Amino acid sequence: MKIRQIVFFLVWSGFILYAWMVAPNGNDGYLNQLIRMNEPDPLLFTVFSLLGLFPITFMILLLSHDNSRLPAWPFAAGSFVLGAFALLPFFFLSTAEKKRSDRIPNILKKVLNAVYFHVLLMIGTAILIIYGLLQGDFTFYAQAFQNSQFVHVMTIDLFVLTGLSIFTLHWDQQKTGVQNKSFLWGILPVIGVMVYLLQNKEQRRSKIEG
């Protein structure tokens, strides 16, 4: 087992134990408030929405090279519901070695890697984050983080996904031969991934479509 696989297994296991044993037990109806759009706090809405946008970025990155023995698409799809809990197992179960041709049809890869799609996602995410930062109540969010298991785990999930996006961008660079430090853009949730994709679109396209 590679060091990468051990590290990701420990992170995944630690995240599960933390959510189960350390996170607060309270659930003050925040999820129901978000689902029903019953005037949720803007910052809470922003974080929740980012967890819905992050899986799209992983679908773009992982499905562009879904050619290992273990398929990536079930983990990417599962992240829409379970976030990092669903994604992390892929990184310690997969050897990341090419074992077959790509599973994903070229037309889907072209849609996922379309420049207009990346630009729209970047602009939409930027508007969402600005809205949350300017209109959100940080005191309210801090109290929710301390008292609600849902908000607590959701917030940590956002940080885990951000760290995972940095690694996935670095992994994408190795696959596509991008020779720079642009994987560090991953520190910006969703937006950074889009910047990386736009910055390296030509080099990635030649590898993905080739």
Image (spheres, rainbow, N blue to C red):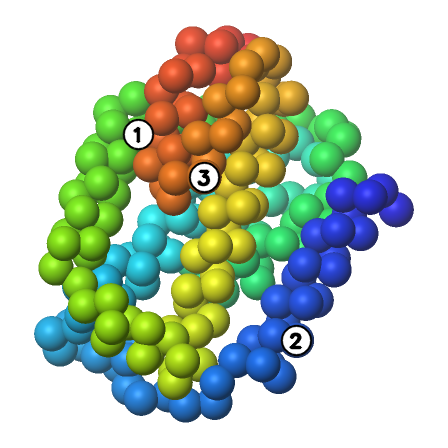
Residue 49: x and y, percent? Answer: 29, 57
Quadrant the C terminus occupies: top right
Q: Which residue is mark 3?
A: 187
- Residue 118 vertical placement versus 55 (above, below): above
Q: Quadrant of residue 125?
A: top left
For marks 1 and 3, give the CA distance.
17 Å
Label 2 environment density (alpha carbons within 10 Å; few <14, some 14–19, many ≥20):
few
Q: Which residue occupies 36% across, 20% down? A: 198
Count of numbered badges drawn on the protein: 3
Q: Does the residue at mark 2 contact the one at mark 3 (Cβ under 8 Å)?
A: no
Front disc: 2 or 3: 3
Q: Does the residue at mark 1 contact the one at mark 3 (Cβ under 8 Å)?
A: no
Q: Secondary structure at mark 1?
A: helix
Q: Secondary structure at mark 3?
A: helix
Q: Closer to the N terminus: mark 1 or mark 2? A: 2
Q: Which residue occupies 18% across, 47% down? A: 130
Residue 128 visible in rendering: no
Residue 4 visible in rendering: yes
Task: Using residue 183 as the reference point, say whether residue 151 is left or right of it.
Answer: left
Q: Which residue is mark 1?
A: 118
Q: Closer to the N terminus: mark 2 or mark 3? A: 2
Residue type marked 2: Leu
